[in-house]
Amino acid sequence: MMSELVELSNHDGVGVITVENPPVNALSSMVLNLLERCLLAGEKDPAIQALVLIGGGRTFIAGADINEFLEVLAGRRALADLHPFLARMEDCSKPIVAAIHGSALGGGLELAMAAHYRVATSDAQVGQPETRLGIIPGAGGTQRLPRLVGVVKAAEMCALGSPLKASAAFELGILDEIITGDLLAGAIAFAKKKARQGAQHPKTRERNDKLGSAESNASALAALRGEVRKSRKNLNAPLAAVDAVEAAALLPFDEGCRNERKIFDQCLFSLEARALIHAFFAERAVTKIPGLQKAAPVASVQQAAIVGAGTMGAGIAMCFANAGIPVRLTDQDPSALERGMKNIRQNYDNSVKRGRISAEVSEHRQGLIRPQPDHDGFENADIIVEAVFENLALKKQIFAAFDAVAKAGCVLASNTSTLSIDEIALAVSRPARVVGLHFFSPANVMRLVEVVRGQATGSDVIASSMALAKRLGKVGVLVGNCFGFVGNRMMFPYMREAQFLVEEGATPEQVDAVLTDFGMAMGIFAVDDMAGIDVAWRVRQEFRHLEQPGVRKPLVADQLYAMNRLGQKTGKGWYRYGEDRKPVPDPEVHSLIEETARKAGIPRRRISNEEIIERTIFAMINEGVRILDEGYALRAGDIDTIYLNGYGFPNYRGGPMWYADTVGLRTISTRIKEYQRAHGKLWEPAALLERLIAEGRTLSSWDEQKQ
Ligand code: 3HC
Ligand code: NAI
């Protein structure tokens, strides 16, 4: 039996149902209908003794089709109900084997758990990642999974959403066999064996042996809830998932499923789910760059080289090594190179100690990083990354040296955070090869890379840079070449307003507490102390000429710098730091702020938490809208992806641009105009904000129009 998406074919008495719904075989309503038809046909066919369910292409079924959730949210379709089909699978008189490669996630795993048996390749992964989308499993996952692995483990898997490798899933009893060699052949052999044995085939829903009781699960679930409240702060879905799984030990299967569905519906229609689903698609949309053909061949990086072995250079070297790419690392200062290599070693040693990688993998990766005093071998590199001090003349000198040594197709990248890629490109004879690759610190940990397009940067260089980011396990987002690019440019007004607020009467700890309550990973003053008060000071020196006379500027940070209160590195900055590096409010800083405000004639008053959010986050949003209008970011969703992956913006708010839509552009504009009346020019509303309001549109609709 044939259809475009699902096909049933007879392999020597075993009916193989293949799902071919690229790219990830998402379980759409159409796929579900066709699966049902193939299942019925296979069950009826006397020439078929057993059934194998397998995914075509690169994966098993990676989940329900998330696009359909958007249609449900828009009121354009009803939510599909998978339960009748899954029950029919379990009740099938012939054994059904799910054969898994790639990923069996969400609805994919739920489907596999309704099969009688599950086999997988050793590199497959299985999991219930729904909470990452703000929802919970909605097709019996919270009821079948605990029947295979126990309530506590299932609650952990559903709440945290991390997938399991095949070996772990086998140990836990989710998988019945790991297939070495050809998956389909192995699955067919397995199915034939089960058909021959002829016994009753296990129905997951009827298994109760691992469920335990309310009492036996209680303390472990309480501990899990505690962990979830900490690690998934302010999120609802992970706790809801624990509730749904807990019910498996309290309610009969069908009732447990009804309970799950009720919770699922509540989650789906929440702001959290809308924001997280937006974030999912926004992250995938960043690769769609007008003018770049996705299918165009991209030269793969075989060898890399880095100049500058400081904080960033050493971290970037690890990124290459982690992706299996040999990398040469050099520094003008032999002791800096030595220090960089020592940091790299310590980092890998820590990963081994924490059990994240094995000692062999660590050795192998370190072996891929080759420290050297010169540019020897740079002529073979496919990419050279510059990560020296933030100084334009120096960077130009380094790029001129690259020009002399690099081969024709080499990408010449700068990790600059503030300097102009166009200026840097003037130093070489081939400006089309020059691009910014703005990694974030610590480079081996942070997922974001801003790929900065200069005026001359070639499309092939952009395509290679985006592909490289993906290969390094990063999210590359294309941005234009403006001061601070996208992420830092939006940080400037955010930081500025935070400092104004303390001058006007707030304290650093009040501002930081309000921001972390809002969901930011860290408060802005704690961030400044971590990055180093001197770092921002240096940037200010470099760009003093851009300051406009008569426009208010923050007054305290320069004084902290002058007092050598450089943040964590000197034990004092906006806060004091003890051994544990936790920020402690410092009365000395309070006095400094009060004294500064007094001298500058800034009246002090009680600042409300609401004002703190508006002044910081709305200022950031206003700048983001300006960036969009000026074309330095392609989409509002790109800005959100930058903020979610590089700046600790709360994912359940979808990023600053999505958040702006949820607050309402009109509300934001009204408040911005009030601040403009109180504080002047710095609060001028972005022109695009006013245009969108006049047209009754949102930032999301701005993106849709650009699709
Ligand atoms: N529905 C619709 N589209 C999906 C999808 C899904 N579940 N999963 C992935 N896609 C799309 C992506 O949007 C992307 O589309 P594009 O090429 O047009 O941009 C394409 O598939 C490839 O995705 P990735 O770039 O992420 O591919 P990777 O190879 O890097 O990763 C993956 C593959 C691990 C499967 C990853 O895509 C993933 O994690 N997907 C989501 C899995 C998930 O959350 N499943 C649960 C869904 S909810 C559910 O099942 C509810 C159920 O309980 C009822
Ligand atoms: P760093 O001071 O830790 O390291 C710079 C290294 O470059 C030093 O080891 C120095 O000896 C070396 N160097 C200087 N001149 C050189 C030359 N002529 N040849 C070879 N090596 C030379 O600086 P960091 O923090 O690593 O910053 C590097 C670049 O990355 C800067 O452009 C910075 O703006 C950018 N950046 C920094 C981030 C951070 O958080 N530290 C984040 C993102 C970008």
Image (cartoon, rainbow, N blue to C red):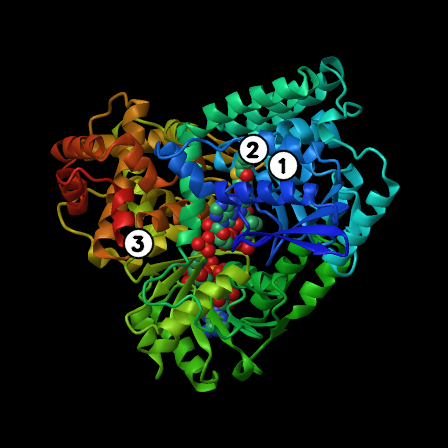
Q: Are marks 1 and 2 in contact (CB under 8 Å)?
A: yes
Residue at 29% of width from left, 71% of height from top?
423
Q: Amino acid at mark 3?
A: Gln
Instruction: Kindly tell me whether mark 1's CB lies below 8 Å from ligand 1.
Output: yes
Q: Quadrant of the C terminus?
A: bottom left
Residue at 37% of width from left, 45% of height from top?
640
Query: Where residue 376 sits: x, y (%)?
Result: 57, 83
**Label 1 element class:** helix
Q: Amino acid at mark 1?
A: Glu
Instruction: Kindly tell me whether mark 2's CB lies below 8 Å from ligand 1.
Output: yes
Q: What residue did someone put label 1 on?
A: 110
Q: What residue did someone put label 3 on?
A: 707
Q: Nearer the viewer, residue 661 or 80?
A: 80
For disc 1, the neighbor class at 10 Å (few under 14, some 14 to 19, many from 20) is many
Q: Are marks 3 and 1 in contact (CB under 8 Å)?
A: no
Task: Measure how far apart labels 1 and 2 are at the Cα level.
Answer: 9 Å
Left or right: 693 as drawn, with respect to 528: left
For disc 3, the neighbor class at 10 Å (few under 14, some 14 to 19, many from 20) is few
Q: Is residue 616 visible?
A: no
Residue 82 disc label: 2
Label 3 or label 1, whichever lies nearer to me, is 1
Query: Where residue 531 sits: x, y (%)?
Result: 45, 48
Label 2 or label 3, whichever lies nearer to me, is 2
Compare marks 3 and 1 and give the one earlier in the sequence: 1
Using the image, determine if residue 626 lies above or below residue 252.
below
Residue at 53% of width from left, 78% of height from top?
381
Compare marks 2 and 3 and give the one earlier in the sequence: 2
